[in-house]
Image (cartoon, rainbow, N blue to C red):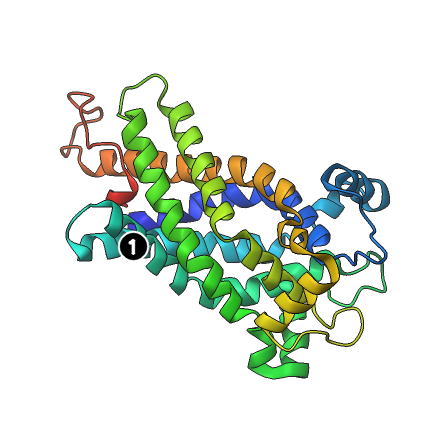
Amino acid sequence: MALDFLAGCAGGVAGVLVGHPFDTVKVRLQVQSMEKPQYRGTVHCFQAIIKQEGVLGLYRGLGSPLLGLTFINALVFGVQGNTLRALGRDSPLNQFLAGAAAGAIQCIICCPMELAKTRLQLQEAGPARTYRGPLDCLAQVYRREGLRGVNRGMVSTLLRETPSFGVYFLTYDTLTRALGCEPGDRLLVPKLLLAGGTSGIASWLSTYPLDVVKSRLQADGLRGAPRYRGILDCVRQSYRAEGWRVFTRGLASTLLRAFPVNAATFATVTVVLSYARGEEDRPEGDAVPAAPAGPALAQPSSL
């Protein structure tokens, strides 16, 4: 179990560093007003942030996901692996159920973390900024709104994360088996990257409209009076004002981010687990294993 958490931590760090700029763009596109849009699309948003705030503007709010996602990934891979072992049989249904369980449990950390990240990504640059960092943001929200404010968007986060993580792990397991990801394969790393990246895209496509709703609920009241009374009211108002396309806003930057982030995450987790288990399985006193046929490549089913 300790290896699951260690590998998840490594994968989380890799994923955050690769994907945070795309996430900043996604959030800004999701919450901008269509009455006075600030950005024309994904590319324009990237260009505007770099021009106005420099490259570091793309990494605003990095502290929250770097701290949070590192632990979240450890929790996700640990819970998924142990749930699958508890279910007792590696099957597509159990892969989905184990992933869904992991997705649901990590919402306890994910929701407050994403609230802080969203607000830091949206605040103005300069000395007049409202929040000094993720902890300061959560502290201010707690003082004003209590625990309910810190957990704003929890229901929409649960509705998003539970099925999407089921799709995530099921897709990765299916693809690694179909691609024949075995130790010693010279194309092993490219195959792992392809499987991980594709899994991330499938996961986001399965629940993306709920992510738009979650971002809007968590940003609500940041610039003016609160507008939404809950999930259904947010859906109704958003659809009435902007049509169905509002629920795909930011999708391009999300998918651009999803492939490299999840490719890096899953490949890192799998390689770390394979190496660590190989070290564990070596006989004492042997500097090098007698044969390369160590443990089977770590699939999600063995995490």
Q: Is residue 23 above or below residue 263?
A: below
| View extreme (top): residue | 186
Q: Kindly identify the residue that appears in the image at 23 percent across and 52 percent down.
A: 84
Question: Where does residue 292 sit, x and y in percent of width and height?
Answer: 20, 21
> Residue 181: percent from the left, percent from the top?
30, 27
| In-image side of 277 versus 16 (left or right) | left
Mark 1 lies on a secondary structure that is helix
User: Of 248 and 250, which appears nearest the observer?
Assistant: 248
Q: Is residue 170 above or below residue 271?
A: below
Residue where numbered disc 1 is placed: 98
186 sits left or right of 278 in the view: right
Q: Residue at x 78, y 76 (%)?
A: 225
Q: Residue at x 42, y 62 (%)?
A: 106
Q: Quadrant of residue 294?
A: top left
Which residue sits at x=41%, y=39%? 266
18 up-or-down from 153: above or below: above
Residue 162 figure quarter: bottom left
Q: Position of residue 109 (x, y in %)?
A: 48, 65
